[in-house]
Image (cartoon, rainbow, N blue to C red):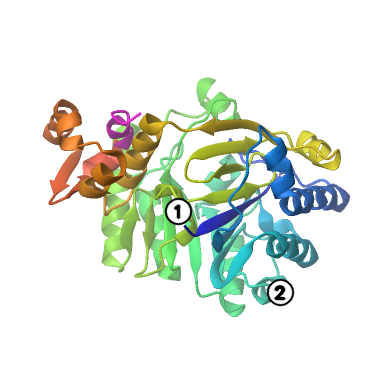
C-alpha cells in the first residue's frame, strides 16, 4: 500500500491563543538548525531507531505518494533547511515523482523569492493558515498577522505559480456573528483557492483562550450559532463549485487533499519530528512532545518514540468505521464486512436505528453516511464505534 510522510516543524512567530499543538516560538536560527539536524538524523536512522524500540520494524518498502510539512509554521524554515530534510527523505524512502507535496504556511512568513524556491524543491500545494479576515478576531487569536498580510501572501503564492492553495478558516469564534462568518467565507471564496478547510472552534483545556473563556473575558461559543455557520458554509461553498468530501473539507473537483485522506482511509503515514504520530496499518506510535527533549534523545542516538499501540480487531474496525464516516462518500458496508467479518446492520442494529431516527445517519444502498445534521453532531455517531 502506498504511504504518506508527515514532517512536524514546531516553530511559530508567536503562539496562538487557541493552539493545543506541539509548538515553540521561533527564538533563533541556531535552535532551528539543531532541530532540523535531529529531524534528519531521525529520518535517515529510522529503521535502526524504530527497530530498537520494542523490536519493531517499519515498512519502508512502501512507495511514498504524499509529503506534508505541518506545524507550527514550516514556512519559517529556510530553503536550505527544507532541502536538507528532503535529501534525508529520499535517502530513506522510495518517493514517487510528481507527488502531492504540501507545506503549511502562515501569512507574512514568505517572500516571492522564497516561494519560488519552495516550488523548485517540488512543493506544489500550500496549506494557508488564514483563520479569519477579521483583524479584531486575529488579535484575539494572537495570530501575529492581519487580514492584509493574508491577502498579500495569497497574491504572492499565485505569482509564484502555486495552483493548489488551501485556506484554513475558523468559525464559532467568541463574539463572532453570522454576518461576520458570511463576510469571511465571501472573501475566501472571492480569492478562489482550490481547497478550503473550514473548522468550528474547539476549546482545548490549558490554552490561553480556554482560560479567557473560563474567566469570562470572552463568552462561551454558541452551539446554535455554530450550527447556523456550518449550514452557511455548506451552502456557500456548493454555490461556488466546491465539493464537500469530508466533514470540514471542501475542494474543487479532483483537488481533495490526498495526504489528509490517507488518515481517513486508515492508510500508512510515517511521521517525523516532535510529537509526530505514525500509523502503518496495524500499529500507531508517537514521538516525544517536548522539543528540547526530542532533540536530546536523537542527538544521543536514542529513539524519540514514547508510546506505541498495536490495535486489536475491535480498535481497527472501530477506527475504520468512524474515520470512513467522516468522508462524504461514507462507509462501504460490504467492504467493511469483508475486511472485518462484521455485519454492522445486524451487529449495531439498535444503535443505527436510533441514530437514523435522530436524522444523524442514512443508508445509501451499500453505504452508511452521515446526514448534514450528523456531520455537525458527528461525535455522537462516532461514539458508537469506539
* Quarter where residue 127 is shown: bottom right
Q: Can you name the residue that lies furthest to the top here?
A: 215
Numbered mark located on residue 197 in the image: none
- Of 213 and 195, the residue lying toward us: 195
Residue wearing tag 2: 117
| Position in image of residue 275 (x %, y %) | 65, 39
| Position in image of residue 203 (x %, y %) | 49, 31
Magenta highlight on residue 354:
no
* Quarter where residue 22 is shown: top right
* 283 versus 166 height, above or below: above
- Of 310 and 229, the residue lying toward us: 310
Q: Say few, some or many: other residues with alpha carbon within 10 Å of mark 2 (under 14 / 14 to 19 / 20 or more).
A: some
For the record, the magenta segment spans 378-386
The residue shown at (77%, 54%) is 40
- Of 154 and 324, the residue lying toward us: 324
Quadrant that contains the C terminus: top left
| Position in image of residue 20 (x %, y %) | 58, 35
> Regarding mark 2 in the picture, which secondary structure is present there?
helix
Residue wearing tag 1: 262
Q: How many marks?
A: 2
| Position in image of residue 367 (x %, y %) | 19, 49
> Regarding mark 1 in the picture, which secondary structure is present there?
helix
Q: Say few, some or many: other residues with alpha carbon within 10 Å of mark 1 (under 14 / 14 to 19 / 20 or more).
A: some
Per the model, the C-alpha gap separating discs 2 and 1 is: 27 Å
Q: Is residue 12 visible?
A: no
Amino acid at each position: 500500500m502506498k504511504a504518506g510522510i508527515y514532517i512536524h516543524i514546531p516553530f511559530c512567530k508567536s503562539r496562538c491563543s487557541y493552539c493545543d499543538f506541539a509548538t515553540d516560538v521561533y527564538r533563533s536560527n541556531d535552535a532551528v538548525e539543531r532541530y532540523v539536524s535531529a529531524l534528519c538524523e531521525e529520518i535517515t536512522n529510522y529503521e535502526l531507531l524504530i527497530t530498537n524500540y520494542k523490536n519493531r520494524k517499519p515498512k519502508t518498502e512502501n512507495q511514498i505518494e504524499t509529503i506534508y510539512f505541518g506545524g507550527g509554521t514550516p514556512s519559517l524554515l529556510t530553503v536550505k533547511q527544507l532541502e536538507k530534510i528532503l535529501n534525508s527523505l529520499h535517502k530513506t524512502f522510495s518517493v514517487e515523482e510528481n507527488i502531492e507535496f504540501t507545506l503549511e504556511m502562515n501569512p507574512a512568513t514568505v517572500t516571492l523569492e522564497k516561494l519560488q524556491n519552495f516550488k523548485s524543491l517540488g512543493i506544489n500545494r500550500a496549506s494557508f493558515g488564514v483563520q479569519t479576515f477579521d483583524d479584531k478576531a486575529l488579535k484575539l487569536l494572537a495570530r501575529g498577522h492581519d487580514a492584509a498580510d493574508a491577502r498579500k501572501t495569497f497574491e504572492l503564492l499565485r505569482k509564484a505559480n502555486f495552483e493548489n492553495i488551501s485556506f484554513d478558516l475558523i468559525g464559532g469564534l467568541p463574539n463572532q456573528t453570522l454576518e461576520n462568518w458570511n463576510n469571511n467565507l465571501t472573501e475566501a471564496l472571492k480569492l478562489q483557492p482550490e481547497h478550503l478547510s473550514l473548522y468550528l472552534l474547539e476549546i482545548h483545556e490549558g490554552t490561553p483562550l480556554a482560560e479567557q473563556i473560563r474567566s469570562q473575558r470572552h463568552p462561551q461559543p454558541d452551539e446554535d450559532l455554530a450550527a447556523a455557520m456550518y449550514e452557511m458554509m455548506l451552502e456557500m461553498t456548493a454555490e461556488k463549485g466546491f465539493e464537500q468530501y469530508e466533514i470540514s473539507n471542501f475542494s474543487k473537483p479532483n483537488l481533495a487533499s490526498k495526504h489528509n485522506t490517507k488518515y481517513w482511509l486508515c492508510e500508512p503515514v510515517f511521521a517525523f519530528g516532535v510529537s509526530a504520530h505514525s500509523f502503518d496499518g496495524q500499529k500507531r506510535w508517537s514521538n516525544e512532545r517536548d522539543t528540547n527533549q526530542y532533540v536530546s534523545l536523537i542527538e544521543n542516538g536514542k529513539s524519540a518514540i514514547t508510546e506505541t499501540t498495536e490495535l486489536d480487531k475491535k480498535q481497527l474496525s472501530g477506527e475504520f468505521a468512524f474515520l470512513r464516516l467522516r468522508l462524504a462518500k461514507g462507509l462501504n458496508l460490504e467492504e467493511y464486512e469483508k475486511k472485518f467479518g462484521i455485519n454492522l446492520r445486524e451487529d449495531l442494529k439498535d444503535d443505527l436505528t436510533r441514530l437514523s431516527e435522530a436524522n444523524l445517519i442514512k443508508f445509501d444502498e451499500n453505504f452508511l453516511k452521515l446526514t448534514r445534521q450528523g456531520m455537525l453532531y458527528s461525535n455522537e455517531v462516532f461514539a458508537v464505534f469506539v
